[in-house]
Amino acid sequence: MEVDVASGVIADVRIIEHQNGRGSSAEAVARKVVESQSLEVDAISGATISSNTILKAVENALSGGM
């Protein structure tokens, strides 16, 4: 996960690797984070676990974790 922040705004979220199986639709969560400027976005129906995994990875990237 790579997250670009410019002037306090989430400019871009890029998924570098996502072993998703059937959860590839969850990758839309990255776009939702940028659009809403928040991690408080709805999971993608049918890909809840993958959605939550992506959100946690974004959170870790923003906090400097991993």
Image: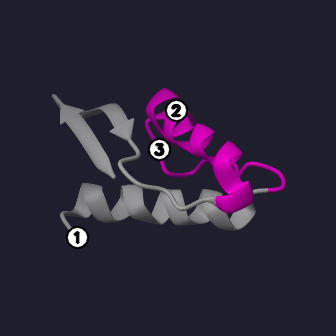
Quadrant in the rendering for residue 29 = top right
- Mark 1 element type: loop
How far apart are the two marked residues, 3 and 2, measured between alpha carbons? 11 Å
What residue is shown with label 1? 65
Q: Earlier in the sequence, mark 2 or mark 1?
A: 2
Q: Which residues are magenta?
A: 21-46
- Mark 3 element type: loop
Q: Residue at x 50, y 27 (%)?
A: 35
Q: Residue at x 74, y 48 (%)?
A: 44
State left or right for residue 32 relative to residue 34: right
User: Camera-side residue: 43 or 19?
Assistant: 19
Please rate how many residues cluster around mark 2, counting C-alpha atoms within 10 Å: few if below 14, some from 14 to 19, many from 20. few
Please rate how many residues cluster around mark 1, counting C-alpha atoms within 10 Å: few if below 14, some from 14 to 19, many from 20. few
Q: Residue at x 35, y 48 (%)?
A: 16
Main SS of residues in magenta: helix
Q: Is residue 1 above or below residue 28?
A: below
What residue is shown with label 2? 31
What residue is shown with label 3? 38
- Mark 2 element type: helix
Q: Earlier in the sequence, mark 3 or mark 2?
A: 2
Q: Position of residue 7 (x, y in %)?
A: 16, 28
Q: Is residue 63 above or below residue 45?
A: below
State left or right for residue 48 relative to residue 41: right
